[in-house]
Amino acid sequence: MPEGHSTISNPESSPDGDQIQASPDTGFWRRLPLKAIFGVVLAAIVGWYLFIADTAADNDFISGIGGLLTGIVELPALILDGSAYTNFWNFMADDEGFGEILRTTFEHAQLVLASMFWAVIISISLGILVNRVRSLSGFVVGVSSILLTIPSLAAFAILISVPFIGIGDRGPIIALTAYSILPILRNTVTGLEAVDRAVVESAKGMGLSSFQRLVRVEMPLAWPVILTGIRIATLLNVGIAAIAVLVGGRGLGRYINDGLTRYPNPGSVERMWVGVVWTIALALVFDLLFGIIRKLTTAKGLR
């Protein structure tokens, strides 16, 4: 072949010169993401339920959508209605009184803090144990995950029948403690595993015992991650604790329950809003406190 010329191979020929039959174009199916296929299937199932199965149970889905759209349209007018805010303020100031609301909020906070006290002790202890004995990781994390999947109302109701628990705050405290274990446990394990092993070995070389290394080296370095787990669990419990009233517990859930029971009588909506707004306010206070605790207990290099 003359120099300067190149050969052009036939894409439909094999190296031996045999012709290759072109295969059908499957590029579209290969490019189609698996998530898209899953989304289409899921949308088909949901659509079937909403438009066929649900309407077969005499539920008017179309009217429900219409009511939802009507509510969205009327929402700005409700938000700008000054009389609603006036009624809400009058209920808090005159009918119920801020002193009573603050007392109930304090009871709600006590419920959360009591459960978090035990959850922190149990979760951090289990996290240290899992970090030291890796074979227990699957079992411990699995059990704590199962505890978190139990519906809160069902857990509260089941604990009523347990001897020495019954109706009151004990059942909610136990349930809230169980719900808080997984976030703190996972973050404890993650934080301890993230500690640089070279730092631990250096501490070991300095003559520190295993307990001293844990307290003076590993836990301080893992503390920001652990504190994040405690923060998440606490905010989660502030909301779940509102259900405690259904099993005789105390807290802001009393206003929500009373409002639902009395609806649509006068003052019922205001009662529900008191429970919701003050629960949110309590969660914001806890979140602010955790921000302060993080700054006070964490080295600047770890913030």
Image (cartoon, rainbow, N blue to C red):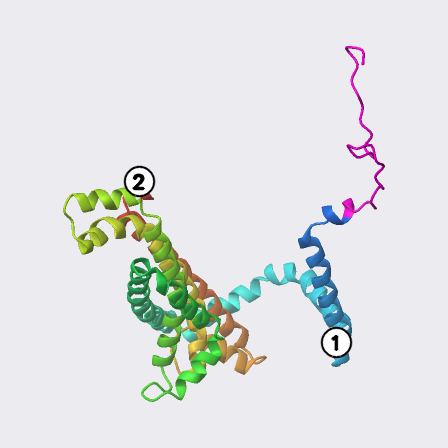
Queried whether the magenta region covers residue 16, the answer comes back as yes
Q: What is the three-letter code of the residue carrying label 1?
A: Ala
- Label ID, residue 301: 2
Q: Secondary structure at mark 1?
A: helix
The image quarter in which residue 13 lies: top right
Residue at which label 1 appears: 53
Residue 148 screen position, x and y as percent: 45, 70
Identify the residue shown where x is 57% and y is 80%.
263
Residue 123 screen position, x and y as percent: 33, 65
Q: What is the three-letter code of the residue carrying label 2?
A: Gly
Identify the residue shown where x is 80% and y is 23%.
8
Q: Which span of residues is magenta-colored?
A: 1-28
N-terminal-most mark, 1 or 2: 1
- Label ID, residue 10: none
Q: Estimate how packed mark 1 is, as few (under 14), some (14 to 19) or many (20 or more) residues with alpha carbons within 10 Å.
A: few
Residue 234 screen position, x and y as percent: 38, 63
User: Most extreme residue toward the left, as rendered?
Assistant: 207
User: Most extreme residue toward the front, as rendered?
Assistant: 16
Residue 56, can we see it? yes
Q: Secondary structure at mark 2?
A: helix
Tell me the quarter of the image containing the C terminus.
top left
Residue 108 screen position, x and y as percent: 37, 71
Q: Nearer the viewer, residue 203 or 302?
A: 203
Give how far apart the Cα atoms at labels 1 and 2 are.
57 Å
Could you tell whether 75 is left or right of 115 in the image? right
Q: Estimate how packed mark 2 is, as few (under 14), some (14 to 19) or many (20 or more) residues with alpha carbons within 10 Å.
A: few
